[in-house]
Image (cartoon, rainbow, N blue to C red):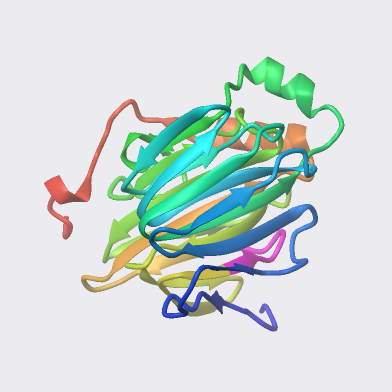
Amino acid sequence: MTEQVNFQYVDTKKEGTHSVELCRGEINGARPVHHKIVAGDSLTFEANVGYYHILILLEGNAVFATDGKEYSFDGRTTFVSDPKKELVVKADADTRILEIQWDEEEGDEADLKEYKTVFPVIVPYQESIQYIDPNKSEKTISRMMIPHEIIPRFTIGSVESYGYDLVRPHAHPMLDQFFYSFAENDMEVIIDDGKYNMKGDAIIHIPLGSNHGAEVTDDRHMHYMWVDFMPDKEAGLKRLNFSHRPTGTVRDFANEDKTR
């Protein structure tokens, strides 16, 4: 059994514009940072710093300005700016952003060319590609917020359901991973032989190679992001190509019976 499970919760009540690094040093080359930007304030993400700025707008209303263009968002959106271009985010309302700083590596330029990646990468949450994999039930809605051949050695997505549902425990030693829970989340994370309650605005590093899953009971809402990094790119892509298969459909629990 895993000896220690550490959830780090974000203090969403903290006032003022500020940034907090999460899970410091837990995955090599990756730094999750929670940003709060008060209405009227702005935050600059510098260019040419050696890592990608992968931003998930969690809540709020903001304008993202980069490379001479502006983009306005008022709902959950994933945004990845060109690492060679400065990005400024100005909040029109109090805004919260989860940033994943992911170190660039030699060979990334070739991968970006092969993937035909065009920056900025913009994916409104409800337009994310939905997929199914062998570890989830047909009830679960799974989304690829950034598919695995867009940013080198990286992918991010989400899992959503209501009780009862189960993400069957599984292991993937070729993928290192964080879970980050949306504000409405209330579920059990399964790690090896233990179950641990995870509520909203929390992050956890899933121990590499552990047998892990998630469970939701009663009428509770399971809604979390998984953030995957590939220490072994080829093995990681092989696993993801096998397990994340697009459904070609767009489902939303707002239009479905959550108890079925």
Return the residue nearer the eye: 195 or 124. 124
Residue range corresponding to the magenta coloring: 204-212
Of all residues, the one furthest to the right in this rendering is: 106
Residue 192's x, y, as percent?
61, 71
Q: Position of residue 195 (x, y in %)?
A: 50, 78
Name the residue at 80% across, 56% down: 28
Above or below, comparing residue 136 to residue 84 in the picture: below
- Front position in the image: 250 or 33: 33
- Where's the N terminus, which quadrant? bottom right
Res. 196 visible in picture: yes
Q: In the picture, which quadrant includes the C terminus?
A: bottom left
User: Is residue 119 within the magenta segment?
Assistant: no
Residue 191 in which image quadrant:
bottom right
- In the rendered view, does 23 fall on the left or right side of 75? right
Of the pair 150 and 45, the residue shown nearer to us:
45
User: Would residue 135 be visible to someone looking at this image?
Assistant: no
Query: Number of marks in the image?
Result: 0
Query: Which residue: 39% across, 49% down?
Result: 62
Residue 125 % position (x, y): 37, 42
Q: Nearer the viewer, residue 138 or 206?
A: 206
Q: Residue furthest front?
A: 40
Which quadrant of the view contains residue 188? bottom left
233 versus 4 height, above or below: above
